[in-house]
C-alpha cells in the first residue's frame, strides 16, 4: 500500500490533534483509589477477565486473594497456574458446585455465607491488593446472601484494595456503587453447535 505525501501529512496532523486531546484528558485524572469492578452479562469471559487482571497485578508483585462462591474445589487450569505463585496467591474455592447440581438451597446458603466470611477476612488482610470474588453475583441472584450487607461491606473496603466481582445478572444495587462495570455480551457460543466444555478454554 502506497501513501502519498499529502495523505501522510493529513494523517500526522490528525494524530497530533488526537494526542493533544488524549494528553489533556490523562492529565486531568489525578485520583488513585481501590476500585470495585464488576464483570457481568450473559457472554463468556467474566472470570477469565478477572484472572487476566490477576496476572497483571502479579507482574507488579501484588498479593492476590480469590474466593470462588459457586465453583467447587474441582481442578482448573487457572488455579493450577496461579498457585505456582505460592504465597502471592490466597485461593479459596468455597462453593459446592453449580446450583442445579446441589439442588439444596440451605446448603448453598451455608456455603455462600462461609465464602463471604472468608472474603471479609481477606479484605482485612492489608497485604492483599486485589481480591476476586468469583461468581458472587450468582450467590446474590439466588438470595444466598443479604444484598444490602454485601454492598455495604464492599463499599467499606480499604482505600487501596481493588475488588473484582464476577457472574451474570449483577444486581442493580451493586452496579450502582461499582467504579467499573463491564457487561460481556453473548454474540455466538460454541455450546449451541454441540461443542462441549474443553480443557484450557472453559476450565
Image: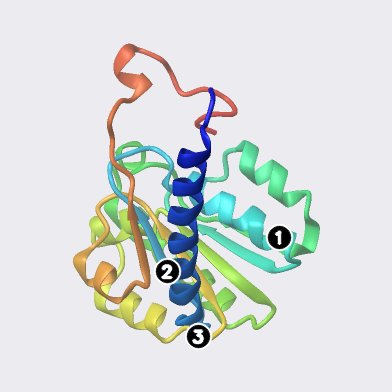
For mark 3, give the secondary structure.
loop
Q: Is residue 136 left or right of residue 65?
A: left
User: Which marked residue is nearer to the observer: mark 3 or mark 2?
Assistant: 2
* Residue 72 in picture, x, y percent from top left: 51, 45
Q: Quadrant of residue 156?
A: bottom left
Give me the residue at 65% from left, 83% from top.
126
In the rendered image, which quarter contains the C terminus? top right
Q: Earlier in the sequence, mark 3 or mark 2?
A: 2
Q: Residues within 10 Å of mark 1 (few under 14, many from 20)?
A: some
Measured Cα–Cα span from mark 1 to mark 2: 32 Å
Q: Is residue 176 left or right of residue 18?
A: left
**In the image, farthest residue toward the top:** 194
* Residue 192 in picture, x, y percent from top left: 29, 18
Q: Which residue is mark 3?
A: 30
Q: Which residue is mark 1?
A: 58
In the foreground, 128 or 98: 128
For mark 2, give the secondary structure.
helix
Give me the residue at 43% from left, 63% from top.
17
Q: Which residue is mark 2?
A: 21
For mark 1, give the secondary structure.
helix
* Residue 67 in picture, x, y percent from top left: 53, 60
Q: Residues within 10 Å of mark 3 (few under 14, many from 20)?
A: few
In the foreground, 196 or 30: 30
Measured Cα–Cα span from mark 3 to mark 2: 16 Å
Measured Cα–Cα span from mark 1 to mark 3: 24 Å
Amino acid at each position: 500500500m502506497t501513501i502519498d505525501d499529502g495523505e501522510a501529512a493529513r494523517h500526522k496532523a490528525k494524530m497530533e490533534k488526537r494526542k493533544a486531546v488524549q494528553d489533556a484528558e490523562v492529565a486531568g485524572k489525578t485520583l488513585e483509589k481501590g476500585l470495585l469492578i464488576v464483570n457481568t452479562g450473559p457472554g463468556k469471559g467474566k472470570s477469565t477477565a478477572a484472572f487476566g487482571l490477576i496476572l497483571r497485578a502479579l507482574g507488579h508483585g501484588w498479593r492476590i486473594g480469590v474466593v470462588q462462591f459457586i465453583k467447587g474445589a474441582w481442578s482448573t487450569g487457572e488455579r493450577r497456574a496461579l498457585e505456582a505463585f505460592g504465597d502471592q496467591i490466597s485461593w479459596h474455592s468455597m462453593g459446592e458446585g453449580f446450583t442445579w447440581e446441589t439442588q439444596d438451597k440451605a446448603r448453598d446458603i451455608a456455603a455462600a455465607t462461609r465464602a463471604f466470611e472468608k472474603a471479609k477476612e481477606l479484605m482485612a488482610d492489608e497485604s492483599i491488593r486485589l481480591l476476586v470474588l468469583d461468581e458472587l453475583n450468582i450467590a446474590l441472584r439466588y438470595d444466598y446472601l443479604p444484598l444490602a450487607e454485601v454492598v455495604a461491606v464492599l463499599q467499606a473496603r480499604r482505600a487501596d484494595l481493588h475488588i473484582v466481582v464476577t457472574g451474570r445478572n449483577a444486581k442493580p444495587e451493586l452496579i450502582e456503587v461499582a467504579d467499573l462495570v463491564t457487561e460481556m455480551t453473548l454474540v455466538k457460543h460454541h455450546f449451541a453447535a454441540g461443542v462441549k466444555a474443553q480443557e484450557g478454554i472453559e476450565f
